[in-house]
């Protein structure tokens, strides 16, 4: 039962990372109000990539 919960949590982390990568520019426009949106979007893409990698590692080593 514990492994199933960990798998679901890691899949949600991966999903959150992919959403950050895909919608980085939209999220930057909606929530942040600084001038250079390219830096904000690239920061969110990097953060989403890190979340995806962490979730994948958790999922891989949970088996």
Image: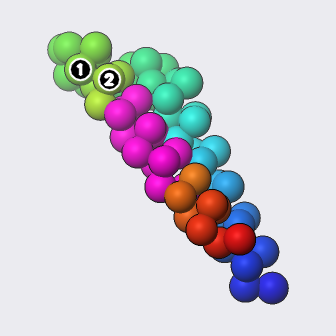
Q: Residue at x 81, y 85 (%)?
A: 1
Q: Is residue 29 above or below residue 48?
A: above
Task: Please identify the dominant SS of the magenta region.
Answer: helix
Quarter of the image where one finds residue 24: top left
Q: Which residue shows up at 48% across the image and 48% down it?
A: 53
State whether residue 10 appears in this view.
no
Q: What secondary structure is found at the residue carrying circle 2?
A: helix
The x, y position of residue 18, in whole percent, is: 57, 36
Does the magenta run of residues contain 32?
Answer: no
The magenta span reads 44-55
Q: Dot 1 lies on which element?
A: helix
Where's residue 7, x and y in %?
A: 71, 67
Can the viewer see residue 24 in this picture? yes
The tag on residue 42 is: 2
Distance (Cα) linking label 1 and label 2: 5 Å
Residue 34 location, x and y as percent?
20, 22
Residues at circles 1 and 2 in contact by the CB criterion of under 8 Å: yes
Q: How is the image coloured?
A: rainbow
Which residue is rendered at x = 67% and y = 55% of the image?
A: 11
- Residue 50 magenta: yes
Q: Quadrant of the C terminus?
A: bottom right
The image's mark for residue 39 is 1
């Amino acid at each position: 039962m514990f492994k199933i919960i960990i798998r679901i949590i890691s899949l949600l982390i991966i999903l959150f990372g992919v959403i950050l990568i895909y919608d980085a520019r939209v999220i930057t426009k909606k929530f942040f109000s600084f001038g250079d949106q390219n830096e904000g979007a690239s920061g969110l893409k990097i953060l989403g990539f890190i979340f995806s990698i962490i979730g994948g590692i958790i999922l891989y080593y949970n088996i």
